[in-house]
């Protein structure tokens, strides 16, 4: 379980690089307009979404002594690291067009490489764990190591590669930090995937074999995707998650600017938030068994999802409403509030991540019972396809909004007009989070609980035993 969870570190590194640095780097330092930056990232995400079903279909059908999932995870490591480095190392003096093409090309390569590791990695977890509660523990390790490493990467970004200085305030304006971070991140991602592959290799003989008669064709891929949508439970979780993913991508465009400009924090102070998140992740991980057993998966997903979406909006709304007792940016209480909000929100993430991925593993069991076919890759890739497709739209919309609010390039703290900051806070906060809460409503219609999953597994065991006797 530990080795499996280490595999998620590669995605966490990539996510922090994209969420904290990428849009800021191209919009603020390279000088690419927000609309073009958002369009480039949207194109990359849309391409990534298209490759998800391909990765899922391939990993469901690969045959060989190294299993279905491990070869794809291993082969993705080097392309992922190389393309990630070049993404943050564009040549100097690029025009808007060439910068757009550079960003689009290497963002596509990074996301494509990540897909051919991430989808098999999720499917591997669903295959390794069969027990209803053990799945939450396995994906809990995965969520813990992914979120914890994300917090560590944030701390390293702010304190090692982009510390505040007299020359650069914020430190993210330092151009030399970007290629150095990307090179270090590349080696770390290769190491994480190597540990995952080698550490879980002993499970290969115990994993399910691919379907003997199923070939990898476009028709089969489409058939797989249609088949998973015939499950009402899958549809409910699917549409709830894509609405949340759409809004999250819109908000992500403005997040890199919030800490520095909206709250007036230095990059070192932002790293304190990452440290608080790391502690919160450990707390959240320790609570996974309690929430899974006490509340089951569906109530945990709904309740903690509402908390995670809402908590960050409280201080933003107080600032937007100009509440008299809410402290100004110069007050040390702003840092306290910032850290407190991050701690509460981050403590929910390991539980949500474990629960969400575990639910999809349960859906794979229900799918096998209904169709007689095991399609972990198809189920996880269909989910990822929709999330990334809507995420691409969200990035594009977010880039347009960034241009609409007219956020300036190379902006130092204190130089951005208050009206621009107010509009920024509105779209990162309540204006978009309202729709994320609507996405949670879909989860109320999910119907697989512990008792129903027990019935599914009993019926599957009976069917497999009968098939074994006939064979």
Image (cartoon, rainbow, N blue to C red):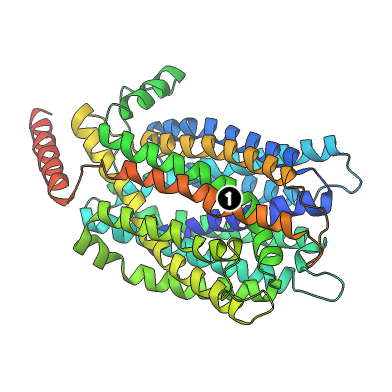
How many marks can you see?
1
Question: Helix or strand or loop: what does disc 1 sit on?
Answer: helix
* Horizontal side, residue 305 vs residue 133: left or right: right
Residue shown at the point (78%, 59%) measured from the top left: 417
Q: Label 1 neighbourhood size at 10 Å, few (<14), some (14-19), many (20+)?
A: many
Residue closest to the far top:
219
Q: Residue furthest front?
A: 324
Report the front residue among 208 and 48: 48
Residue closest to the far bottom: 332
Q: Is residue 101 above or below residue 195?
A: above
Q: Is residue 17 left or right of residue 51?
A: right
* Residue in the image at 41% along x and 73% along y: 282
**Which residue is pictured at 81% across the width and 53% down the height?**
408
Rendering coords of residue 244 (x, y %): 46, 45
Write down the quadrant of residue 452 in the picture: top left
Task: Name which quarter of the figure residue 224 lies in.
Answer: top left
What is the quadrant of the N terminus in the image? bottom left
Q: Is residue 292 left or right of residue 63?
A: left
Residue 76, given in percent of the width and then of the height, sits at 56, 45
Residue at the right extreme of this rendering = 93
Check the picture and name the quadrant holding the C terminus. top left
Q: Is residue 296 above or below residue 72?
A: below
Residue 198 screen position, x and y as percent: 45, 57
* Residue 251 in the image: above or below residue 390: below
Q: Nearer the viewer, residue 447 or 75?
A: 447
> Is residue 468 among what the camera can see?
yes
Residue 66 in view in this figure = no
Give the residue number, with chain letter if any, for mark 1: 251
417 lies above or below 369: below
| Residue positioned 54% across, 57% down in the render | 12
């Amino acid at each position: 379980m530990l080795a499996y969870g280490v595999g998620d570190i590669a995605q966490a590194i990539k996510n922090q690089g994209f969420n904290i640095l990428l849009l800021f780097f191209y919009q603020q330092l390279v000088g690419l307009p927000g609309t073009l930056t958002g369009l480039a990232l949207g194109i990359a995400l849309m391409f990534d979404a298209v490759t998800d079903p391909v990765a899922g279909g391939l990993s469901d059908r690969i045959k060989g002594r190294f299993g279905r999932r491990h070869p794809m995870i291993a082969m993705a490591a080097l392309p992922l690291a190389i393309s990630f480095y070049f993404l943050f190392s564009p040549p100097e003096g690029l025009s808007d067009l060439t910068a757009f093409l550079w960003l689009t090309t290497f963002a596509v390569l990074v996301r494509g490489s990540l897909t051919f590791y991430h989808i098999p990695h999720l499917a591997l977890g669903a295959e390794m764990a069969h027990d209803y509660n053990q799945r939450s523990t396995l994906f809990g390790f995965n969520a813990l190591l992914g979120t914890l490493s994300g917090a560590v990467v944030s701390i390293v970004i702010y304190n090692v590669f982009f510390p505040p200085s007299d020359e650069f305030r914020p430190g993210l304006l330092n151009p030399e930090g970007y290629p150095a971070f990307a090179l270090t991140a590349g080696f770390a991602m290769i190491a994480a995937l190597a540990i995952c592959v080698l550490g879980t290799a002993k499970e290969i003989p115990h994993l399910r074999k691919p379907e003997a008669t199923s070939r990898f064709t476009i028709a089969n891929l489409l058939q797989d995707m249609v088949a998973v949508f015939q499950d009402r439970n899958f549809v409910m979780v699917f549409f709830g998650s894509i609405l949340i993913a759409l809004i999250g991508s819109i908000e992500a465009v403005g997040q890199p600017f919030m800490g520095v400009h909206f709250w007036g924090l230095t990059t070192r102070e932002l790293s304190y938030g990452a440290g608080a998140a790391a502690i919160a992740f450990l707390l959240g991980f320790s609570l996974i068994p309690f929430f899974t057993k006490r509340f089951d998966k569906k109530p945990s997903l709904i309740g903690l999802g509402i908390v995670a979406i809402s908590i960050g909006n409280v201080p933003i709304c107080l600032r937007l409403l100009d509440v008299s007792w809410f402290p100004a940016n110069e007050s040390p209480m702003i840092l306290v509030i910032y850290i407190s909000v991050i701690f509460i929100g981050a403590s929910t993430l390991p539980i949500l991540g474990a629960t969400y991925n575990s639910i999809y593993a349960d859906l794979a069991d229900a799918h096998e019972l209904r169709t007689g076919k095991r399609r972990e890759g198809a189920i996880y890739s269909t989910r990822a396809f929709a999330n990334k497709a809507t995420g691409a739209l969200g990035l594009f919309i977010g880039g347009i909004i960034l241009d609409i609010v007219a956020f300036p390039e190379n902006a130092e703290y204190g130089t951005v007009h208050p009206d621009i900051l107010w509009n920024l806070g509105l779209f990162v906060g309540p204006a978009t989070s309202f729709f994320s809460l609507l996405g949670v409503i879909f989860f109320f219609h999910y119907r697989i609980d512990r008792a129903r999953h027990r019935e599914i597994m009993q019926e599957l065991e009976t069917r497999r035993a009968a098939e074994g006797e006939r064979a």
